[in-house]
């Protein structure tokens, strides 16, 4: 999570040093996915990927509300789950979920 926040909020303010990181990511994205910028985080089994995903969504949403004219933050998310077990675990994330199951 710290890496995502650093790349979004700190790197752009670091001048040439930060620009080098961002330019490298932009070039890799352009090569792999022209016109579609992506950032992927790889975590080991049981490292808390679901929690990190929830924190990224919360961070993006809060910042989108605080900075409505900024293009750096989004209010829309697409969550694709690979299986029923993961989908069931994600059901607790919406604020309107009837019960909060332990994750």
Image (tube, helix red, strand yellow):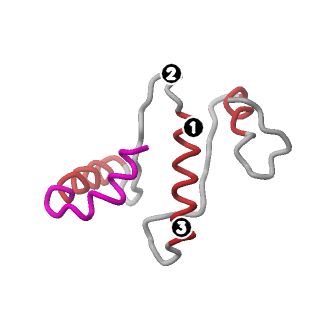
Residue 101 in the figure: left or right of residue 65: right
Label 3 sits on residue: 64
Picture coordinates of residue 17, whole percent (x, y)? 15, 56
Q: Mark 2: few, some, or many residues within 10 Å (few <14, many ≥20)?
A: few
Picture coordinates of residue 81, whole percent (x, y)? 64, 36
Q: Residue at x 51, y 49 (%)?
A: 56
Label 1 sits on residue: 51
Q: CA distance from mark 3 to mark 2?
A: 30 Å
From this view, report whether residue 16 is shown above or below residue 92.
Answer: below
Residue 82, numbered circle = none
- Quadrant of the rendering where the N terminus is positioned: top left
Mark 3 touches mark 2? (CB < 8 Å): no
Label 2 sits on residue: 45
Q: Mark 3: few, some, or many residues within 10 Å (few <14, many ≥20)?
A: some
Please tell me how many numbered marks the rendered image carries. 3
Picture coordinates of residue 99, whole percent (x, y)? 83, 39
The image quarter containing residue 92 is top right
Mark sitting earlier along the chain (2/1): 2
- Quadrant of the rendering where the C terminus is positioned: top right
Q: What residue span does the magenta drawing correspond to? A: 1-18
Q: Residue at x 67, y 30 (%)?
A: 86
The reply to whether the magenta stretch includes residue 4 is: yes
Q: CA distance from mark 1 to mark 3?
A: 20 Å
Q: CA distance from mark 2 to mark 1?
A: 13 Å
From this view, report whether residue 100 is shown above or below residue 29.
Answer: above
Mark sitting earlier along the chain (1/3): 1
């Amino acid at each position: 999570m710290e890496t995502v926040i650093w790349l979004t909020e700190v790197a752009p303010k670091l001048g040439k040093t930060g620009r080098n990181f961002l330019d490298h990511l932009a070039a890799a994205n352009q090569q792999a996915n022209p016109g579609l910028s992506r950032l992927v985080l790889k975590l080991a089994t049981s490292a808390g990927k679901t929690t990190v995903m929830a924190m990224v969504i919360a961070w993006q949403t809060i910042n989108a509300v605080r900075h409505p004219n900024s293009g750096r933050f989004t209010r829309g998310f697409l969550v694709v789950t690979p299986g029923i077990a993961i989908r069931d675990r994600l059901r607790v994330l919406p604020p309107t979920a009837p019960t909060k199951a332990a994750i």
